[in-house]
């Protein structure tokens, strides 16, 4: 695991070099197979770079979300421990009810923090997936081939 930003940048540069070499080999293979303009227009390069950027963003997002989850868990555990100690020290019924409400509030706040972290992660995943969708609407709305039939049409 890289220890500072320069190590991380060097690691990313090495991965980019490996990806570029792999893409050049893939493009050469497609050209040899006779796939038209596979090397010239760079579609594969663009898609692979988008995939690499998306995967890197997702990895960072997962790591950030994990860190937030751990911090929320530790904070909730500390508050819960102190709330339970207050509960043990109670002498009056009103103090017991207040301590129980404090325990409940701690649990709800911890769940809220974790839920917010999940919502942020979900939005980042959605944005990354949206970035990977085809840029041309015609790719998504292409007509079905004539050989594909609907189940409901056969009667």
Image (cartoon, helix red, strand yellow):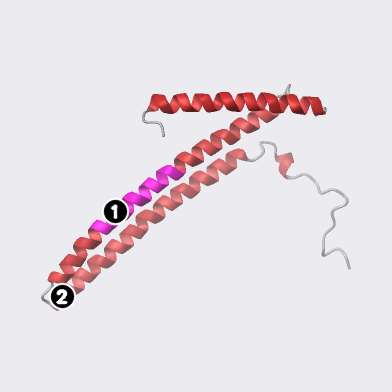
Instruction: Pick whichever of labels 2 and 1 is earlier in the sequence.
Output: 1
Residue pictured at 10% horizontal, 75% vertical: 91
Residue pictured at 40% horizontal, 31% vertical: 2
**Magenta: main secondary structure:** helix
Front residue of 90 and 133? 90
Front residue of 127 and 77? 77
Kindly indicate the quadrant of the structure image that contains residue 80.
bottom left
Quadrant containing the C terminus in the rendered view: bottom right
Residue 85 left/right relative to 43 = left
Q: Does the magenta stretch include residue 37?
A: no
Q: Label 2 crowding class (10 Å Cα cut-off): few <14, some 14-19, many 20+?
A: few
Q: Label 1 crowding class (10 Å Cα cut-off): few <14, some 14-19, many 20+?
A: few
Q: Determine the secondary structure under disc 1.
A: helix
Q: Which residue lies furthest to the top in this view?
A: 40
Residue pictured at 54% horizontal, 46% vertical: 126
Horizontal and vertical percent position of residue 68: 36, 48
Q: Which residue is labeled 2 in the image? A: 94
Residue pictured at 25% horizontal, 66% vertical: 103
Q: Determine the secondary structure under disc 2.
A: helix
Residue 50 left/right relative to 37 = left
Q: Residue furthest left?
A: 91
Asked if 58 appears above or below 30 in the picture, the reply is below
Q: Give residue 51's mark.
A: none
Q: Give the range drawn in magenta.
A: 62-78
Q: Give residue 74's mark.
A: 1
Horizontal and vertical percent position of residue 120: 44, 48
C-alpha separation, residue under disc 2 versus residue under disc 1: 28 Å
Horizontal and vertical percent position of residue 79: 23, 58
Is there a contact, CB below 8 Å, between mark 2 and mark 1?
Answer: no
Residue 36 seen anywhere in this rendered image of the structure:
no
């Amino acid at each position: 695991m890289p220890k500072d930003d320069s190590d991380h940048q060097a690691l990313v540069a090495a991965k980019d070099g490996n990806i570029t070499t792999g893409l050049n080999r893939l493009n050469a293979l497609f050209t040899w197979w006779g796939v038209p303009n596979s090397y010239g227009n760079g579609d594969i390069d663009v898609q692979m770079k988008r995939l690499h950027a998306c995967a890197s963003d997702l990895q960072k997002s997962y790591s950030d979300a994990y860190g937030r989850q751990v911090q929320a868990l530790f904070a909730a555990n500390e508050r819960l421990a102190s709330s339970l100690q207050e509960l043990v020290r109670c002498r009056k019924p009103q103090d017991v009810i207040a301590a129980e409400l404090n325990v409940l509030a701690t649990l709800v706040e911890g769940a809220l923090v974790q839920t917010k972290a999940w919502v942020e992660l979900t939005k980042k995943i959605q944005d990354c997936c949206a970035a990977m969708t085809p840029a041309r609407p015609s790719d998504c709305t292409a007509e079905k081939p004539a050989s594909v039939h609907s189940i409901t049409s056969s009667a």
